[in-house]
Amino acid sequence: KYPEGSIVEGKVVRITTFGAFVELEPGLDGLVHISQCALKRIAKVEDAVQVGQTVRVKVLKVDKEAKRISLSIREALTEEVDYNA
């Protein structure tokens, strides 16, 4: 349902020191690592996103066995900039 490379919307549900968890649908969260939260380097995740915020993310990797999805806000933003240029 969420193929690698696709751009989807989700809601930030939890923030940690290493990233933000984004809910793609009820019961399914993905992780945006802090390095993938913004176009530029940030000191903390809250500098880029807040809990409850809706964000566009790119699906980087789906690990079905570990039930983990790696997401990127940065790559979704980069693609939008390229698309709109």
Image (tube, rainbow, N blue to C red):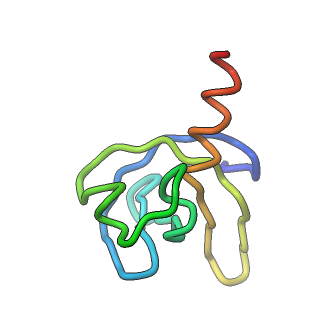
Residue 9 against residue 50 in the figure, above or below: above
Question: How many numbered circles are shown?
Answer: 0
Residue 73 against residue 71 in the figure, above or below: above
The x, y position of residue 14, in whole percent, is 31, 70
Residue 84 against residue 76 in the figure, above or below: above
The x, y position of residue 63, in whole percent, is 72, 73
**Viewer-nearest residue: 6 or 78:** 78
Q: Quadrant of residue 19?
A: bottom left
**Viewer-nearest residue: 16 or 38:** 38
Which residue lies most toward the top here? 85
**Viewer-nearest residue: 61 or 45:** 45
Q: Quadrant of residue 67?
A: bottom right
Q: Residue at x 70, y 26 (%)?
A: 82
Q: Residue at x 71, y 58 (%)?
A: 60
Q: Is residue 50 left or right of residue 27?
A: left
Q: Is residue 66 left or right of residue 42?
A: right
Q: Residue at x 67, y 83 (%)?
A: 66
- Quarter of the picture containing the C terminus is top right
Q: Residue at x 31, y 60 (%)?
A: 47
**Viewer-nearest residue: 2 or 45:** 45
Residue 84 against residue 61 in the figure, above or below: above
The x, y position of residue 15, in whole percent, is 32, 72
Q: Is residue 27 left or right of residue 7?
A: left
